Image: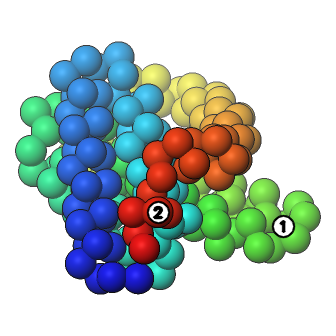
Amino acid sequence: MNKTRVLALCSIFSALGVIILYLGALVEVLDLSMAVVASLLVIMAVIELGGVYPWLVYAVTSVLALLLLPNKFAAVVYFGFAGFYPILKAKLERVPGLTCLVLKLVVFNLCMLAMYGVARLLSLTLELEFALWMIALTLNLLFVFYDIALTRLIGAYLHAWRKKLKIDKWMH
């Protein structure tokens, strides 16, 4: 595989990721959705490039989004979880059975705890402190649905979108 083409593809994925996150920052209702959509580009990097390149796409997209976006929420969600989770998902799914789900939930909860801690340090506390356990439970349920949806999107990419985008032919 030609390194120039690989780096060009990483650059394209990163630029598209920043644009997608920027759309989420402009239309605040879409910020979480766009963080997830931007993470699909990391999935493509995992499948098409492997190795260190998905981490490179994640890092470049995160830094640029954190620097450039007017509203940072989409960038923070991408940096704090959505951007790197697809890379970890590929590794975690090699673990058999229920252990895989437990490990995924541990990663998710550690990320949410870290983001919550940063928010508290920055005095961005939630008004609903008393219901924090309900929020945590809801987020964990949403994460399970997100993980299932991500698995299906990966399947759709492998079986339909990949042929239409012809990325594998561009790589050779």
* Residue that appears at 41% across and 69% down: 171
* Amino acid on which the number 1 mark rests in the picture: Thr
Position of 55 relative to 148 (above/below): below
Q: x, y (%) of residue 147?
A: 67, 45
Which picture quadrant has residue 104? bottom right
Which kind of residue does numbered mark 2 sit on?
Lys
> Quick one: quadrant of the C terminus?
bottom left
Q: In this view, does 106 lie to the left or right of 6?
A: right
Residue at label 1? 99
Give the residue at x 24% y 78%.
Answer: 4
Q: Which residue is drawn at 9% across and 44% down?
A: 68
In front of the other: 136 or 103: 103
Where on the picture, by quarter, is residue 105? bottom right
Residue beneath the point at 65% across and 73% down: 91
- Which residue in the structure is indicated by mark 2? 169
Q: Is residue 135 left or right of residue 34?
A: right
Front residue of this view, candidates 38 and 25: 38
Establish if 33 lies above or below 47: above
Q: Is mark 1 on a helix, strand or loop?
A: helix
Applied colour scheme: rainbow
Could you tell me residue 36's position as x and y percent? 46, 39
Q: Quadrant of residue 84?
A: bottom left
SS at mark 2 in the image = helix
Residue 30: % across, % down: 36, 22
Q: Is residue 168 above or below residue 164?
A: below
